[in-house]
Amino acid sequence: MKTAAELKYGEKGVINGIDGSHPSSRRILEFGFTPGQEIQLINMSLFNDPLAFSVRGTIVAIRKDEAVCIKIL
Amino acid sequence: MTAKTLEAEPLITLVGPPNSGKTTLFNYLSGKNYKTVNYPGATVEYSISKIQKKYNFEGKVLDSPGIVSLIPNSPDERISIDSLYSHPTFGIPDLIIVTIDASQLSRHLLLAEQLIESRFNVIVALTMTDILNRRDKDISISKLSEELNCSVVKIDGRTGNGVEELIKEIEENIINIRGKDKVEIIRFKDNLPIEKLIDFYKEIEKIEHTVIIEKNGTQNSGNIKKANEKLNVLNNRSNNHNNTLDNTTLKIDRILLHKTWGLVLFFLIMSLTFTSIFWLAQPLMGLVDDLFGYLSTEAITLIGNNWVGSFLANGVISGTGAVLVFLPQIIILFLILGLLEDTGYLARGAMLIDKPLSKIGLNGRSFVPMLSGFACAIPAIMATRTIPNKRERLLTIFIIPLLSCSARLPVYALLLAFLFPMNKSWLAGLVLAGIYLFSIVSSAIVAGIANKFRGTIIKEEDNSSFILELPTYRVPKLQVVATNTYHSSMAYIKRAGTAILFLSIIIWFLTYFPDYNPKIDTHNLNQEKAEQIISSERLSNSFAADLGKFIQPIMKPIGMDWRVGVSLIPTFAAREVFVSSLALIFKVTGDKGTLQTSILKEMRQATIAGTGQKLFTTATIIGLIIYFIFALQCISTLAISRKETGSWRIPMLQLILFTSGAYFLTFIVVNGLRFLGIN
């Protein structure tokens, strides 16, 4: 399954699930990345990491190795 | 009922996610008249205050650090949450006010839900409803209150509208609580399954549907949608009604986070910040210096040149001056960083630089503190509080002293003037830039090494993470930033200030006693010159000189003698003192304008006693520069590092590792250059 880290610049996706075994999973959920939410990759930093996603009306920057725990439909 | 009938002063704690308007509300309630307290033994700070008199309600209000949820993700967050459940000094809060950004309802309600589920008495303060209105939406206060089963009050952060009503609600709630039996608070388990978190969001989305009203009059959630509530979480592709991004923010980000231009602008903004800390503060620092120099001379004139006069002039007044001379830089730094933070840019800067810094065990948020380190390590170390990950924060504090602070500049200037003749000053400037570059590279290397030896230098283990909200751009609130700057500066004066003053007095003691009275033929000399000669004779016979002679065997291998040693001792109070100490020890008696020229002349002639070998050569001067780049010889830095890390471990490691490392490198450089025939 695709993860949020694999989204292309500007691409949208709907969250299917969060990998609970990842140490950052709880924090990511607390920022509003819940199943069913539509997210969009709206910016990428230097070396394409961290990534900035829009979620629930705000923008959240996440490192690539943490964004892999967000599974996309 | 009036406040007087309440038995004890109730404790009201403000809780809220970052950027939810919590501090603004706290400023309204406290009237900006608060004090900052530390959680015992830790670096988490709280502000506490009585509720302003004008509201005619007696109660204490406690401002807590911003949190997203009641499940801690870092050691500092754990302390914040622990003390929310039961503060070691203030106990369990009678009432919690949770600030919630109405335009971020679906994210911010999480904290409110968790607080209510813990059975706290909660009032919701709803902020930023104006942003919601701009999106042609409104929120039903009564419905939200009904859904959450607690009081909800709208607060306008710009006008303060709603604060009066909030006080009324607080009063009613407190009376209500006092009439009932105490409810036991239930703590959240740290390992709360993520399914439970998702359930919270399901609940929140349900509430959101009920309370958000479209401006055209229709409620968002029709009956059909209500029937599908349970499926909403999985099928809400279309229900992003409250989740519109700010268009202006997106446009600005297109430039500021642009692959090339974003980076160029980042470095431009940062160098501007850095140079303004440097240049704006210079005249003010000069002013402080002059003022205390004047006061110190006046004290001697007034009391006389005895030990009391000298204690006041050179111990107390100069010591106070040494504390206050950093104040302009600290104020300017906090002001600029506060404004940048408030606009929303700082979070973007951290994002831009996170990748390269993560390679050496640091975090995107380490960048600003490191930059500040070029001005002064004290505000820089204080600025590391924004790094949530404890290990990365400690590592950042660890390397900050290696970034060449502005107090080292006069020293470099003198030493470079020795190496390069006047007509080649451009070369000196080039080498100076090289010194700064060298200090950046070496601090990165040290961070990398310290990161490799994790567990020995930085003992904390913490999951390295970078998840940061990039807030909507907005015009910064100067007043809020100014208040914060004021409190940070006061914190510096109180905490680091006392230590600096105390140590300045010790150094005064070492340089004044045993109160030697030189017999000097002052014939043929004007008074000023005579005094300077007396001062330098006194210094050569002081305890500091004894100490200098005692460390002579240490100075010898690096090609220096006790006189350099003596000059290095007072640098522990302030590095720039090295220049004036050298002047004293070499009995330089020039006027201020020609001081540097005179010192240089004396330095060129100085020889090591007994050998006739020149003391200052190209090799030893380069050695001294290397020493000043690495050595931690600033007591103020140690004091603040102790305070911010919560123990003596890191400051002692910094002192021992950096100073012995500096000595070792100086030894290699001096002897290496000599071996190569450069003397």
Image (tube, coloured by chain):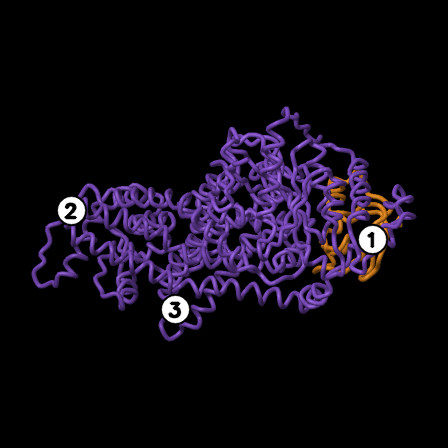
Chain colours: A orange, B purple
Mark 2 = which residue?
B306
Point out the frontmost of discs 2 and 3: 2
- Camera-side residue: B276 or B199? B199
Which image quadrant is residue B368 in? bottom right
Mark 1 = which residue?
B219
Point out the frontmost of discs 2 and 1: 1
The chain holding disc 3 is B
Q: Residue at x 47, y 56 (%)?
A: B404
The chain holding disc 1 is B
Q: Are marks 1 and 3 on the same chain?
A: yes
Q: Amino acid at mark 3?
A: Phe
What number of labels is visible? 3
Above or below, B69 relative to B326: above
- Camera-side residue: B374 or B427? B374
At label 2, counting other C-alpha atoms closer than 10 Å, the crowd grade (few under 14, some 14-19, many 20 or more) is: few
Q: Amino acid at mark 2?
A: Asn
